[in-house]
Amino acid sequence: MSKVNTALASELQYYGAKEFSACYNCGNCTAICSLASENNEFPRKMIRLSTLGLENEIESSLEPWLCYYCGECSSTCPRQAEPGELMMSLRRYLTARYDWTGLSRRFYTSEIWELGAIFLLAAFILVLFIFFHGPMTTELTAEGGVKLNTFAPWKTIEIGDWIMAAFLGFFLLSNIFNMYLKVMVRNNNVKIPIKLYFTTLWDLAFNFATQWEFSKSDNKTKIAGKQFNISPYWIMHWLLMSSYVLMLILIMVFLGWFQTDIIYEWWHPQRILGYYATFGLMAGLIYFFYNRIKKEQESGKHSHLSDWVFIVLLALTTISGILVHFFRIYGLPYSTYYMYVFHLMVLFPMLMIEVPFSKWSHLAYRPFAIYFAKVKSAAEKMNSKN
Amino acid sequence: MEEKRNIGVYICQCGSNISDYVDVEKVREEVAKINHVSISKTTMFACADATQNEIVQDIQENNLDAIVVASCSPKLHLDTFKNVAERAGLNPYNYVQVNIREQCSWAHSDKPVQATEKAIQLVKAGIARAGYSEALIKTKISAENVVVVVGAGVSGMRSAIELADLGSYVYLIEREYFVGGRVAQWGELFTTNETGKETIRRLYNKLMEYKNITLFTGAEIISNTGTVGNFDIQVKIRPRYIKPGCKVDPEKLQKVIDACPVEIPDVFNFNLTTCKAIYKNFESEFPEIPAIDPEHCTRCGECEKLCDDIDLGQKDEFVNIKAGAILINTGYDPYEPKTGEFGYKEIENVITLPQLKRLIELSGKELIYKNKKIHNIGYIYCVGSRQKDGENKYCSRYCCTSTIYTSIVIKNKYKDIHNFHFDKSIRTYGKLELLYREASENGDIFLQFWDEDPPVVSRNGNGTVVSIKDMLSSGKELEVDCDLVVLVTGMVPRQDNKIADILKAPLGRDKFFNEIHPKLRPVETVIDGVLISGACQGPKNISESVKSSLSAASKANSLVKKGEIELKPTIAFIDKNACVWCDECLKACPFDAIIKVQSDGKDVAEIVEAKCKGGGMCLPVCPENAINLKGYTDNEMEAMITALAD
């Protein structure tokens, strides 16, 4: 026996779900949804749970992570209840529920907290540079490039990177563990043999690397009149994702090789990889900006502050990174230094806020959700056989 | 009775509907052999204009004294060919229709030979009947252009105004001391947002403009002895105990009310409050003069001491009215739940929807019931309607909308109230659907239960809990804390429905008044001149009630405005020589159309022509075979049987 709780509906408004109470349970969303099955009324079940305010059941649900917002449900809804946007909002809500620090909830539900934290962290970086930066030499290298490593030695930066990474990793992993507890331990009546966690590990790795489920959306890519079985959203998303993962690897592991004072030829792998990443990021960003501004696709029609913060910060990081590169090779020392500081002032809050507490955490929650769902269904199958 | 000697017979092919299976030419050949048949023809379509004209010509040229058309069901074309006869100068009752389509060709499409034989027999029987057919003349009776409208609720008042506009004189008879009926009890109403009171005030002011409307309040019809055109009605008017010329001074009235020692449950507020024996339900109620309830007044005289306009010596008055038609507009009662039905009368915060509506009217800025501020309201739908086990199988139509509109009013008027709807599926049909949407958007929660698994209301400590197996969440068991549980009660027929007996107006299985035909004659009853409209006929919302009352008004006016009414001639008649007055026929007649009269020194039965419906119930019970039915006489029937048996 569960108690109906009206408070959740008002709370979900802050996470972006403003229209779902208009739902009158016709089930059109379920009829059109490619993820719906006989046993899972996707997404109507989540709408109903939200309406009734059954927090524990929502908390243990994986459905929001399996939805990739193709938007068919929203465009079919006869009452404009925006089921797709509810699923999006539930992802925000779940991110906040998994986060034991409570920061995520603050960031999602309060604009002051979100923007305040960004400026505070940016100010922190600024202060660090003001006190600890290296000499701002105007002397150029033999090739005419700026001596960036004199201003900000890569070894020092790398140490900072690792401290930050440890920080991020700790919060993200602990939140994933929290997710595991809520989904697989509490509110779970299926007995799960440990070995299943290992046999399905491949799914986790594969989905982590590709977010392949995205490609299965009903939206098909058309190139020169030919239709491909992959959604354009996935292509752009993967382009963006592979680019920032590449950037992350270069910065975290190969910073000494990547942040050099030497100017290599244009074909050198250091520059080629850098250019690929900036191209991927820019192309992806343009696509996502276009989507949110034009509002042609359902997924772009509703933008929460956190959606804008994410792409704006990523865009600023990318553009400032490109400028640092060109200011350096064209020998503009002060421009290079200031832009470098700005670059880190954007990058740092972006990673600190987005990865463990906001939208970037999807990169972990989505593959884990698919992984947990696989484990659960395998366990159910085993149990039914016995 | 002279047998007709000169009969025309037409056998229709109905395109090929008949002729594919019945050999129409053979039928014609067979019936042509009958002596009295002077003309026999087959035709492609008897109902076609050309054929109709041909029949007219045949009748006139050959002086036919009866015609028979063998074609489709009389339901389809009886009137068509009656008109043909009339156009040719032949009495329409000398026309006989034989059904050889539905009852022959279609029914026996697998056996054409036998179908043809059957058709021959049927047509022969028709010819035999035509031979004994009589020319019947419609009787005409005079009619008063006066209509009695029973019940001054919204639809009664509206129809009274309409009838007065159309030129009829109207007597509007209201049982209560004030007009307005149920609508006066309600606050804001969809779609106008006007309150019930305002609507009634508007109608009342309009009503008062008419010289040809007389309103009686506190009045009831106690008997009727007349029939259509000439109803003879006696009305009893209970005293108001207040002199008619009284000019109401609200302050003085309050003093008088305060002085009255009698305190009784206030029915106008569905017993939520109490009132005195002298009362007015609300200040702007009409007529403006208050009333003293004679049933509860102890005649103590306290009020008389304070006010000269009070006269406890007033007596019942009786008025006789002659009217051409009667319009019943007596409305409905809200269903009264049984003790224990969803906790009603057992758990203190379980009330009905009408009570909630009065509670809102009586409340200020906060919704308070029994000294507790209300936060969560649970509405349980279909209480007393759509019953699985009970008698009320029907849907009351208005309640879904009314509840949802009330929940919206509550949302707008009070802060922090949550609405929970426990329904069986929402029926906010037509434009009313917009309200359903608005309520959902307000965040109201709708939960749906199965017929066999209704919600359960139970006490839980200080509070009340409604538990439900929710159909919309795959049968999940849910609980809702409610500090007010509202039973959405439907409409039932008036408990006191004496008027049905007095006027002999028939009730349906659901005990609401019954119309002749739900689609084609929706406001007439089988009693000529007695019309029904509004919720006394079945659950209706206000606009539906008013629509039906306007329709009944124009029907009533069209009946009486010509000053005379034509009656069907196919009624019973009595052979006074044979009759011995055993009263069997009177007992059999459902319409009281038989009276006892003196004839040649003995008691005999007589048919009241305006009341007789030609039902034929009296015929078989007569031991002397003294009764016949015009148009269906023994001669006709026996001739048909003989023809069929040949």
Image: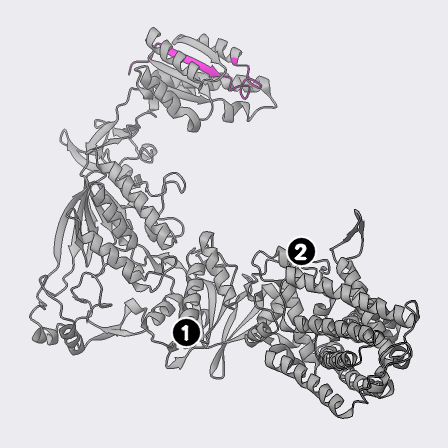
Q: Within the magenta stretch, is there residue A143?
A: no
Give the labeled residue for mark 2. A31
Query: Depth check: B372 or B513 in front?
Result: B372
Specify the label residue B567 is tagged with: none
Q: Determine whether label 2 and label 1 are within 8 Å by CB.
A: no
Total count of labels: 2
Nearest to viewer (mark 2 / mark 1): 1
Does the magenta segment cover residue B8? yes
- The answer to whether residue B581 of the structure is visible from this angle is yes
Q: Residue furthest bottom?
A: A131
Percent of width and height locating residue B420: 50, 69
- Which quadrant of the view contains residue B624? top left
Q: Amino acid at mark 2?
A: Ala
Residue at 80% from the left image edge and 48% from the top image edge = A224
* Mark 1 burial class by Cα count in 10 Å: few <14, some 14-19, many 20+: some
Q: Nearer the viewer, residue A139 or B269?
A: A139
Pointer 2 local density, CA inside 10 Å: few below 14, some 14–19, many at least 20: some
Q: Chain of mark 2?
A: A
Q: Give the SS element for disc 2.
A: helix
Give the overall secondary structure of the magenta segment. loop
Q: Which residue is mark 1?
A: B414
Determine whether the residue tagged by mark 1 lies in a helix, strand or loop. Answer: loop
Which stretch appears magenta?
B1-24
- Chain of the residue displaying label 1: B
Amino acid on which the number 1 mark rests in the picture: Tyr
Residue B275 locus on image (x, y percent): 24, 73
Q: Would you place residue B46 above or below residue A220 in this image?
A: above
